Image (tube, helix red, strand yellow):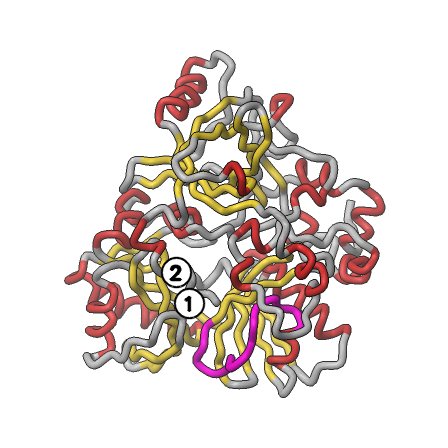
Amino acid sequence: MTFSSLQQKIDLLGNPAIFLRDVPVGAYQYPVQSQFSNWRDEQRSWRETVGLLDQSLHMTDLYIEGPDTIRLLAEVGVNSFKNYGRNKGKQLICCNHDGFLIGDMVLFGLEDNKVNVVGRPPVANWIRYVAQSGTYDVTLELDQRAVTNPGPRKTFRYELQGPNAWELLDKLNGGNLEKPKFFQMGEITIAGHRLRALAHAFAGAPGLEFWGPTELGPEVRAAIVEAGRDFGLELVGGRAYGTCAAEAGWIPSPLPAIFTGEVMRGYREWLPGDGFEANGSIGGSFVSDDITDYYLTPWDVDYGRLVKFDHDFIGRAALEKMVDRPHRRKVTLEWNAEDVLAVERSILTGQEPGKYMETPCAHYAAHPYDAVMTGGRLVGVSTYPTYLSVDHQWISLAMIDEADAQVGDEVTVIWGEPDGGSAKPGVERHVQKEIKARILPWPYLEAARKIRTHTA
């Protein structure tokens, strides 16, 4: 069955909380080579030497240009845009009218009135809808991620991360590389080509993200590979890349809060019936027939500190009412090794087998939500279970009620879906298991925690 819009899909199929649990689409795709060496050494690279990550294919790019660029961004974004402009990076956070997250993307200030918005599709789609529904003097250009793009991408996008990254970058530049300040932009010359770049880091590792016209990508990549031989360079494939978010403490894909409310109906009628929002699968042990139970606030994902009431924006009135309420707190969960082994043992013996844990990323839906319990009470949700080979440790990110989110305390993650599992093709018949986990701060590495406030 085909649907003309997301709204028509809801009208015909009913409750989105139910049909999104059974849509046949799995986890978010990273359409690059799975492994270049092996994902364990590739994970190790950004901790110990340097890794090259290819971001050219899996993210949506939206280019916005015109006199009203900043006005548009400020009206959809909860964070401040004072003094924002050329050569500045920024994390754009968007909410619906009720203050619940639609998502976030990274802004690249190409010029004072021109930006590139990069990330997963929901925020780019929301910006396009708001811009087209209002009176903004802007032009928009959408460059969709590779899995939905019939043509070539407009740019390549590479990232070098790790303790040897700056030395390698300096060599590629021919020396005298001027390092931009953190989350600021600059330029670098590679293989004779001058490229725009953004300085940032994940998992505590220094690095630079840079991009240019697609046709230059192979030449730039070849120069990096050649120069990188002296610095322990590893090419990072899709399997290792998928672990970056959990290690860095970033929840990349909150379920966009767009499925309810008459004020959002026009948007749902605008969205296609076969797009990301219409097929973003929900998975995990947390199950509700109320789609709003999957919605998140900025405080749930530690974006509350970035909300600035210095401008009018969509959702402001609702967020002002939320400020002084109790909030969930984002934390890292360190999973108990014996409980993980018990899941593995059950799979091997076939006696009440648990849900298979794919390594290094065990999430099997676009929006993974596992129940977190303490004392028989639901206290939060866990998401993006990930194995870090350097630490020999399974971790996940979680959003836990403030009163129960004490560092060092133990909680229980319910692993696997109820009633034998949903109808998603990636879900085999299984039995739910309990996995104890210890609450830790985020990001998982202490070195990375020192720079986590960079996105303001």
Give the camera-side residue of 413 and 417: 413
Contact between marks 1 and 2 (CB within 8 A): the answer is: yes
- How packed is label 1: few (under 14 Cα within 10 Å), some, or many (20 or more)? some
Question: Residue at 65% of width from left, 81% of height from top?
Answer: 139
State whether residue 426 appears in this view.
Answer: no
302 horizontally vs 186: left or right: right
Task: Please check the rendered image and state whether residue 327 is part of the magenta-colored stretch, yes or no.
Answer: no
Question: Label 2 belongs to which residue?
Answer: 54
Q: Quadrant of the N terminus?
A: top right
Magenta residue check for 77: yes
From which residue to which does the magenta span run?
75-89
Q: Is residue 130 left or right of residue 411?
A: right
Residue 126, relative to residue 19: is it above or below? Answer: below
Q: Which residue is mark 1?
A: 157
Three-letter code, disc 2: Asp
Please indicate, yes or no, whether residue 345 appears anywhere in the rendered image. Answer: yes
Q: Position of residue 110 (x, y in %)?
A: 48, 81
Question: Around disc 2, counting alpha carbons within 10 Å, would you say few (fewer than 14), some (14 to 19), or many (20 or more)?
Answer: many
